[in-house]
Structures are given as C-alpha cells and as structure tokens.
Amino acid sequence: MFNGGLTNTSINDPFPIATNPIQTPTGSALGVNTNLGAKMVYYSPSIRVPYSERASLDVQYQIGNSIVVELGYINNHQVHLSYASTVDQTPYIPYLSRSPYYSGATNNFFTGAVYAGGGPATTNIPNPFKGQPGITGSYATSSLLAPSAYLMSNPEYTSVTEQLIPGSSSNYNALNARVYKKMGHGLTLNGVFEWSRLLGTFGQLNSGDILNYQETSSDYPFHFSGYGTYQLPFGKGRQFLNNNRFLNPIIGGWQYSAIYQFISGMAIPWGNVIYTGSGFRDFHNVQHSSANVTGAHVFNTSVFDTRTNATTAAAQPNPYLPNYNPPIQPNAYNYRTFPAYLLRQDYTSNWDMDVQKNTTLAEGINLELRLEAFNALNRPQYGTPNVSPTSASFGTTSGVYSGANARQLQLGAHIIF
C-alpha cells in the first residue's frame, strides 16, 4: 500500500497496529455473535452435483465418390448449476421503485435522507446494535440505521450471501451442417455451419431476486468454418507439363490453401437503462460498417433516454425547492427489467491464406517454401460499443476488439529428408 509514494509499512513491521493490524481470531468465544457487523457467507444446505442431459442426431449422405453431406442436431441441458445470491436483500424487492426512472421518494426511503424545506420525516431508526458485544464496523458506532440496513433479512450483518445454490440451468440447441469433398483433381473442400443458441438462468437482474432466463456472453448463434486446398495442375505428378524437367522446378509443386471463419458477435452486457422504444426492431444494430470508423452510432440511440437530469440546468434533487431538477437515470433502488445482455458487437469474419511450393532438391530431399497470411484481408473487428446512455460516446465504438489482430505475414522454409 502506497501513500504519496511512500509505503505505510516496513519489512520489520508489515502489520503495524495503527494502520494495518492483524485481526485476532475470536474462535468460538462469541458464539452466535461471531462476525456481527461484518459480511456473512454460507453454503446452500442442499448442494447438488450438476450434470448434463445430452441428445444428438446425425444423418450423412454420400454423393458420388468424393462428396459427403452431413446434418446434425445437438441438445445439451445442464441442471443443478450453482450460483450465489445476496439473500439478505430479498426483502428489498417489494419496496423497489417499479418506474424505469430514478425515484427520489424511493431513494430517500432506503437511505433515510430528508429534504430541506419540507417533505416526509426520516425513515431512520435508532441503531439497536450499537454497544452490543461482538459488533464491529459501522454498526458499532452509528447512532441510526437506515432502511437499507434494517430491511435486510439479517441486519446484524452488512451482507449475507448464500453460495453454491443448485438452482441455475442452461439449454443449448444447435443445428449443424457439413459438406466435405475429399481430394480430387487437386481440390479438397470442407465447410461446417452451426446455428445454435445457449440460454439459461445464469444470473439475477435484481440482487436477491429470482433468476433471469437470458442469453450470455458465451452465446454465438452463427458459426461457419470452411477451408479449401488446391494443388495447381502443373509439374511432375500433375495433369499438365508433368514430364518437363526444366519447367518443373518453376511451375511444379504449387499449392494454395485458405481458411475462412465467421462467428456472430458477442452479446453486449448492459447496465440498467431507460428504454423508450416499442420493440427489438427499434434498435437497428449495425455490427460492422463505416459507422465504426466515422464515430457514428452503431445502434439506434433515440430509443433510450440519455438525460442525466430532467433538464440541462444544474442538478437539484429537492422537490421542495424552486429550482428542482432531479436525476432521472435509475439506480440500485429501481426494480430492473431491462435485460442484462442486448444487441451484439462486431462479428468475426476472417481469412487465413497459405501458398506453398514443394521442390525436390535430390533423391529423398525436398524443400518446402511456405508463405502464410493471417487475417489476410486485414479486416478490423471493432470493439464493444459504449452502452452508457449519459456518455457523449453512447452508441459508438472506439478501437478494435482486444482479441483481434492486424494482418500478419509469415515466411518459412523446411527441408525434408
């Protein structure tokens, strides 16, 4: 830990009593009062072993001697997946504002704040934990408790989390298609297409609430991979000019390969925002276009309320003052219904290419020259757009995705003997 460039501790005394003391374990001396005023974590009493139920069906059909067509379906249902829940906040749920907009009344109710010049009395109560044995933290010194504390199911702790709850599940469905052409006349082709969805109860929109059935950042609906190899029909062992020993070192032994991959963009995670549209067709999500370069919006921002306050005047949350100008964006005391994931960032569309030349230097000795191009078309994969409605950059992208690379060329030579 640093303070103005100087450490607060030394090697001789790494845990000074004044600034960084080691807390002495209480053992069992406090009994049920152990950890009062601090966080509490416990494990679900009904821990289950997660498992998967999987089913698949494949059909293959051969066309001629060299082409195979395959169709398949996969379902994978996972149950008893574990998650954690802040169960002490479950009693909050009925008191949260159901409006998508910030609620001053709800916020003041939870925090116990009062308005100058009028308004309801504070909702704070005298702190019943002050002075009690074993109480630590702010509970040991505060004179009052706000509803955000005493409405919790176990207010004697600052938070209570239940872990390893076996209530989460997922459902994966995929339709696969594959076409394969084995080597013939120097040509090999293989293409695989997958249309899939991964949905499940992976998290909560509101702390302590029920699980939300949703997509996740691991859901990529469309995936296509294809590769092809073509041996040019010239030189020894090929269709044309196969007996010309003078031209063979130049025109013989050439091979070209290419790999293409397309993957849907990752689902974009959102915070709680104010949506004013009427349906998914309002978004007009454009994942890859000139908008990524020019700084234009990649989705329709007009269906979101982007104001910070009700007007552009200075913020004033007190409704009893004449210059009242409250914030409008939701906070932790709004009941969230906006999904955790919405729209998608730029998709993957990548070509890798390879040119190879094989030359016989002597009997049993071959030279292999290879030029490889990764992301051969130098296509950028743009980063995740800004999804903070009050930001000036809302709806725009900046830079490229962290996993994307610019074009790379690689030249190599192998001697095989």
Image (cartoon, rainbow, N blue to C red):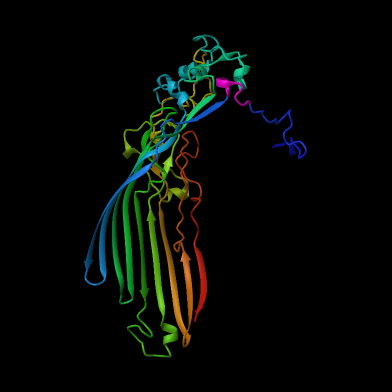
The residue at the point 43 percent across, 51 percent down is 290
The residue at the point 45 percent across, 53 percent down is 381
The residue at the point 30 percent across, 77 percent down is 185
Q: Which residues are magenta?
A: 26-36
Q: Is residue 280 magenta?
A: no
Residue 273: x %, y % from top left: 43, 32
Viewer-side residue, 228 vs 204: 204
Viewer-side residue, 408 vs 55: 55
Residue 31 against residue 232 in the figure, above or below: above
Viewer-side residue, 250 vs 211: 211
Viewer-side residue, 376 vs 214: 214
Residue 121: x %, y % from top left: 51, 9
Q: Quadrant of residue 27?
A: top right
Q: Is residue 34 magenta?
A: yes
Q: Quadrant of the N terminus?
A: top right
**Do we see residue 282 in this rendering?**
yes
Q: Quadrant of residue 253?
A: bottom left
Residue 147: x %, y % from top left: 50, 16
